[in-house]
Amino acid sequence: MPVLTRDEAQTRAQLLDVHRYTVDLDLTTGEETFDSTTLVHFTARTAGNTFVELKPATLRSVTLDGQPLDPETLSDNRLPLTLTEGEHTLRVDATMRYSRTGEGMHRFTDPTDGETYAYTQLFMEDVQRVFAAFDQPDLKAVFEVAVTAPHGWTVLANGVTTHQGDGRWQAAPTPLISTYLVAVAAGPWHSIRTQHAGLPFGIHCRRSLAPHLDADADEILDVTRQCFDRYHEKFDEPYPFDSYDQAFVPEFNSGAMENPGLVTFRDEFVYRSAVTITERQTRAMVIAHEMAHMWFGDLVTLKWWDDIWLNESFAEYMGYQIINEATSRYPDTWVDFGVARKSWGYDADQRPSTHPVAPAPGAVPDTASALLNFDGISYAKGASALRQLVAWMGEKDFLAGINTHFARHKFANATLADFIDNLASATDRDVHGWAETWLRTTGVDTLTPAYDRATGTLTVTRTGSRPHRINVGLYDHDLADGRRLVLRDRLEIDVPQDTPANIPGPRPALVVLNDGDLTYAKIRFDDHSEERALRTLSGIPRPLARAVVWNCLRDMVRDGELEPVTYLETARAHLPEESDLAIVQGVLGFASAHIADRYVTAEDRPAALALLTDLTRDLIRRTEDGSDPGLRLTAVRHYIDAANRPGTLQGWLEDGSVPGGPELDPELRWRILARLAVLGATDEAAIAAELDRDPSATGQEGAARCRAALPTAEAKAAAWDRMFTSDTLSNYLFTATAQGFWQPEQADLVREYVPRFYPDATALADRRGPAIADAAGRFAFPAHAVDAAHLRLAEQHVSSDNILPALRRKLTDQIDDLRRALRVRKS
């Protein structure tokens, strides 16, 4: 099946001006398909040949300017068109398939109450699964969408929708937008509506989640209003659409999607179980991120997918910055960014699949290649680069350049060159030179300090090629409390340095490079500072500086410069004193998912789990007074995951609570049951009983995860069949099954499936497409099997030419992580 190439898109853009789509969808025709009728009004600048994309179940009829075309000419989802110069109208009438993979028009029936919902995700190439289109981002048009829906449903779209009777809904015409941004969400939604700044605002979810949305509605709407107002303080261009709806939809593949006027979120953001303040902060950040796209992505859109970073890096940066500025209910968001997001970028940037933030012209030749660039580089590294840019050129000039960009390209498309030119117009800094060194290069620089006692000077050496403006924190011991440090001074240094920096007074106890985390680089310590960091980490006064130090230790483990057990011991020593929950979560996440699961050998794993169990028990004891419920919840979750004996967990499950709290909500109950399944301390009867207790969609996923984790040959065979043979699992149920299947404790039981994974995953990806391919590569990969034989097998398979690009990219990354784990074990 062909994908759209950059050359094809440029040729078509030179030929066509697309004016308007009139799309009519009928969602009342059955459970497997829906009807789609599309009228496209466009102009051909000259006579020529082109094509329109469509992926139908049945193509009933096509007419061009009233003259019928042969539906049999549709080939590989392309319908050829021969055009004369002038205006044209294309009419396409088709039957389309609903999706169960989160692509196109996804259909979901809620197991809690039997209600059905349908929503679109049309990103990249998936508009073709819903209606016929000239599917590329630089052929913007006005969209008029009508939907016929079952009785009792509400239809949401990019513009305000009106019910015209008999299930017929009409959406207001959109401004000029790209095809991939068209959105429809239909079903018996539970809706909360309000107004702000003269516009209708709404939040929506499945009816079964109504009590949970109601409980958080004030928080969600407050964040939405605060972000909206803050963006209007920063941006000269007003919000460009007629309404702002946020729909929390089931089985959504991404965190959210920036459809103008109708942002769709994964409905796990409607919390039905207890969550921490950092999880609420993440939801708020995603709200701010998607709202930023209303300007950067929707109002001004990339011309081709090589500039995807223009969308995502900007929204990532603004999401964190706006939440930091506009709201007061969350801690410093940049700490969470430093711990939870930058590591995503650092890891991606050190793999063979790395790429520049802004790929060179021609490096993204088609849409299949573009899809691979939605990664930690386009999001976290790009946002880090923008944060460094703001530190370097100043926020005032940065925003002036952004506003020029919006004014020059609103309702149109722009490129990297346009963006850089507009920034450069607002400053005397060499923004073009900055862009070349930061956006066109790959890899992570490393910064290392050297203190000269004789001269009292500090030199920072750099491995890499980028300029960095950083803060350097100089810390001394607190004379009143030797366990604590005090900040003596914070220097601002440009790397590379012209001259060493003078350090007045005695040698600092600790030197921390990038103390404010304003740049994107790995840091290291001088010999003196490394020892002090390991001993006094929790005594560093600012959480952002502590996050930088923890990231340094993480990188050192991954690079074979710090023993994994030393990291665990450092966590045991300092996390009980840590006050920032994002840091606790980040450190425990790395300690469990990377160190305990991959970086230590099977023989050493029990000791690593025991250390994690002791650490989390310490945190649980620290919070017995109820002073920090978020920390307690985090500790309980990780205690469950690290437990290697079932007794305590069985007691909690029987009692329905942890002594002293919390009560076991559905998330904790399924978490405990999954760990008991791994340990062989539960069975199918108990899983079925828990599913009776919680028959929700989340409960179905929990049961799938538990069943796949049972340590029997029969359970593993059944789970494998569900994943790789039957093709009946939705995207979420596939992921849950994959998460349960591979367990380090069950390595011998699942050994025979390791070589089966590669051919079975390849065949699955070919049958079910990119979304399931991504899930297979991410969640169904046998990551626990850290050995040379597995590495040879994996490398041999990935060298094959017949692997779907989405799967190949995931396997390439997983194999590199496997190599790194082997190196760490040998170091």
Image (tube, rainbow, N blue to C red):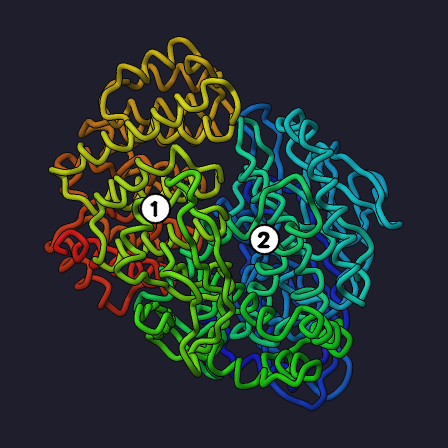
Q: Residue at x 62, y 59 (%)?
A: 60
Q: Residue at x 13, y 51 (%)?
A: 787
Residue 751 in view of the camera: yes
Position of residue 344 in the picture relative to residue 185 (left or right)? left
Quarter-of-image position of residue 770: bottom left
User: As shown in the figure, which amino acid type bears the numbered disc 2?
Assistant: Gln
Position of residue 146 in the picture relative to residue 518 (left or right)? right
* Image coordinates for residue 322, horizontal then vertical, percent: 67, 54
Looking at the image, which residue sits at the far top?
655
Q: Nearer the viewer, residue 206 or 292?
A: 292
SS category of the residue bearing label 2: strand
SS category of the residue bearing label 1: helix
Q: Nearer the viewer, residue 534 or 682?
A: 534
* Image coordinates for residue 569, horizontal then vertical, percent: 26, 39
Position above or below: 735 against 312: above
Q: Residue at x 56, y 53 (%)?
A: 104
Residue 95 in view of the camera: no
Q: Nearer the viewer, residue 345 or 464?
A: 464
Residue 779: which disc? 1
User: Dividing the image into 4 quarters, which one contains the C terminus?
Assistant: bottom left
User: As shown in the figure, which amino acid type bears the numbered disc 1?
Assistant: Phe
* Image coordinates for residue 760, horizontal then vertical, percent: 26, 50
Q: Nearer the viewer, residue 95 or 214?
A: 214
* Image coordinates for residue 464, horizontal then vertical, percent: 35, 76
Distance, label 2 to label 1, CA atoms, is 22 Å
Looking at the image, which residue sits at the far right?
198
Q: Earlier in the sequence, mark 2 or mark 1?
A: 2
The residue pinned by badge 2 equals 121
Position above or below: 687 against 791: above
